[in-house]
Image (spheres, helix red, strand yellow):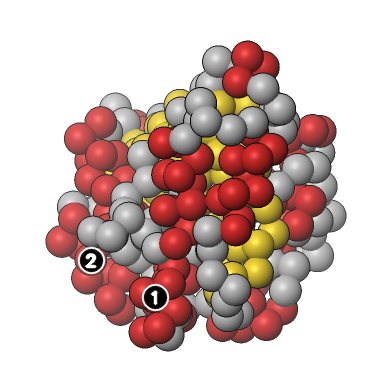
Amino acid sequence: MKIFERKADLNQYIEDAKFDGKSIGFVPTMGALHAGHLALVSEAGKQCDIVVASIFVNPIQFNNKEDLKKYPRTFESDREMLEKTGCDVIFFPSVEEMYPEEVEEKYNFGALETVMEGAARPGHFSGVAVVVKRLFDLVHPDKAFFGKKDFQQLAIIRALTKQMGSPIQIVGMDTVREADGLAMSSRNRRLSAQEREQAVELSQALNFIKQNKNNFTLVQLEANAIEKLSRNFRVEYIQIVDGHSLQSITDWSQSNYPVVCAAAFLGDVRLIDNLEF
């Protein structure tokens, strides 16, 4: 496995691989890897000749500077896990390497980014798009692999490739969960032992909606799901939306692809989750 910290070195490797007719699968990450990331890498290895994973904590997508400081950085263990999973290349740039000059690009995704995560974290998705666009331009992947846990981000990435006029195939993969149902996340390691026990309540609340979808109105389902969370949770949203437009729906007839999405703080850790219907 090769590790590149400089864009020029990665560029040369990619050029050589493309010249040899190799297909490239790409898994962008911010590190602090878990089984969900490794599932993406494993699938990329099945579908492509070469797997490139990036590890870069992108500062311009953080609204909260304290959150940026606290984000786990575990490169050595990440490297070991990626090597065991069959990753061929790690791109591990510095902030200066990715952003040698002040970032001026801005992206607008219309209604996709004004709801849920976009409403709670203004400018977040523009920051995500900036780094993903730069990474795509460096890696030139045939396919890029993303987890559905970040459901809105996946929709934004699909919209970004359309704006780019890019042929990159975006592959969305199902959320990987702990045995009790908690969605795997790099942030989970910041939970205390007590908070970790309580965290599963978020996925349980979403499952309550799915199991009772015909027993209440959608507004009642959302309210009931929030009430099922302990008082230690600070809920930002639990919304049933159309999975294509991400706009809230008030009746099942308004969507052929409903998804319930949620975000809530447990202590100072922000958890997100979703469930497709």
Q: Nearer the viewer, residue 154 or 89?
A: 154
Image side of residue 107 versus residue 36, left or right: right
Residue 160 lies in quadrant: top right
Distance of label 1 from label 2 (alpha carbons): 23 Å
Estimate the x, y position of residue 255 in percent, counting from the top left. Answer: 61, 18
The quadrant in which the N terminus is found is: bottom left
Which residue is label 2 attached to? 81
Q: Nearer the viewer, residue 162 or 17?
A: 162
Local crowd size for mark 1, using a 10 Å CA cut-off: few (<14), some (14–19), many (≥20): some
Dot 2 lies on which element? Answer: helix
Residue at the far front: name it: 215
Dot 1 lies on which element? Answer: helix
**Foreground disc of the pair 1, 2:** 1
Image side of residue 109 versus residue 6, left or right: right
Estimate the x, y position of residue 19 in percent, counting from the top left. Answer: 34, 32
* N-term-proximal mark, 1 vs 2: 2
Tell me which amino acid carries mark 2. Answer: Met
Image side of residue 113 versus residue 234, left or right: right
- Residue drawn at (39%, 75%) of the image: 196
Which residue is label 1 attached to? 196
- Residue drawn at (79%, 33%) of the image: 111
Q: Identify whether 49 is placed above or below 242.
A: below
Estimate the x, y position of residue 268 in percent, counting from the top left. Answer: 60, 80
Numbered label attached to residue 106: none
Estimate the x, y position of residue 91 in percent, counting from the top left. Answer: 42, 60
Residue 182 visible, this angle? yes
Tell me which amino acid carries mark 1. Answer: Arg
